[in-house]
Image: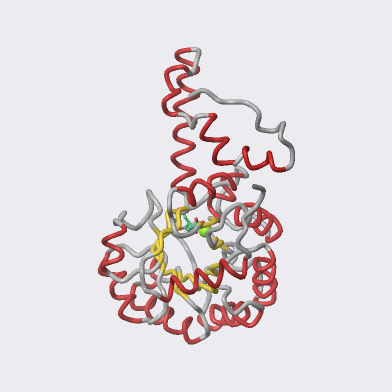
Amino acid sequence: MLYAQTTPADKRAGFRERLASGELLRFPGAFNPLSARLIERKGFDGVYISGAVLSADLGLPDIGLTTLTEVAGRAKQIARMTELPAIVDADTGFGEPMNVARTVQEMEDAGLAGLHIEDQINPKRCGHLDGKQVVDEHTALQRIRAAVDARRDPNFLVMARTDIAAVDGLDAAIDRAKALVDAGADAIFPEAMRSLEEFAAMRAAVDVPLLANMTEFGKSELFTVQQLADVGMNLVIWPVSLLRLAMGAAERGLDELTDAGALTGLLPQMQHRADLYELIDYEGYNHFDTSIFNFTVAR
Ligand SMILES: C[C@](O)(C(=O)O)[C@H](CC(=O)O)C(=O)O
Ligand SMILES: [Mg+2]
């Protein structure tokens, strides 16, 4: 009922423990608080909160238009709805290193288990687009040092994302990843890796947990969980996938309405009212008021 029972501190501690085990943790992207519940129900390890999804949700492109307040607010709504740890995409940290520090504290207060900060210039753009630019090493490291210094819970995960591979190649990405780890990054998100060999090379270069981004229609091939585990990845995200699936279904539904004038033919593809109520735990609210869940929903 209402929000998660697990405290943010416990979520972070549990997440750190599982990361330390070396296994590959699966974090699908939630596009709203309800979908975070579904991710939990289906047995995944955590919830990813994507900047691309948050901006698309507002009808905006993913080019750094969203603000810290908007992202932290939405991330809080999503994180509090699940017992799973949630990690959030904090883009470039919303400004200068001082702003990165504030971003970390806001995300801690919002109940997140961690975030990632990337080394793109401001304004950033989707990591799978062409024409990206990255900041120099000094600035990239400053952002990470600021993030690490600012956190109050040592279990809050500060992940450094580097976009440099698409600009200067894999060797540059490896050098940058090592420097980011030396600056205190707890984990590395090497963006836009093109092959399993590139992931493996990154694995050989650093000792901290590594994240693989399995976003569709981008620069990376879509590898399976097993393939990524075999090259030593520790986290995998499908950041925008649930939104893409939901929007694809919505589009087909609207077309069906136009063509058939009713949605009867699509009922089998819809989440049933009974399943929705179960996911939201309507019954649990009877604890407050026995008249809330006094109906039955026929399947
Ligand atoms: C991971 C990512 O940063 C996101 O915002 O979800 C995006 C995903 C995407 O646009 O497909 C990215 O830059 O890879
Ligand atoms: Mg992003």
**249 vs 274, nearest the viewer:** 274
Colouring scheme applied when the structure was drawn: secondary structure
Q: Is residue 221 visible?
A: yes
Instruction: Give how far across and how far down residue 233 sits, in percent.
Output: 35, 69
Instruction: Give how far across and how far down residue 219 sits, in percent.
Output: 36, 57
Q: From what the image shows, is residue 153 above or below residue 261?
A: below
Q: Is residue 127 left or right of residue 153?
A: left
Q: Residue at x 69, y 55 (%)?
A: 73
Seen as rendered, the residue at the extreme right is 289
Q: How many marks?
A: 0
Q: From what the image shows, is residue 236 above or below residue 98?
A: above
Q: Residue at x 40, y 71 (%)?
A: 210
**104 vs 55, nearest the viewer:** 104
Give the image quarter of residue 79: bottom right
Q: From what the image shows, is residue 192 above or below residue 293?
A: below
Give the image quarter of residue 92: bottom right
Q: Residue at x 54, y 81 (%)?
A: 141
Q: Is residue 153 left or right of residue 254?
A: right
Q: Is residue 114 visible?
A: no
Instruction: Give how far across and how far down residue 292 sits, in percent.
Output: 70, 33
Q: From what the image shows, is residue 203 above or below residue 59?
A: below
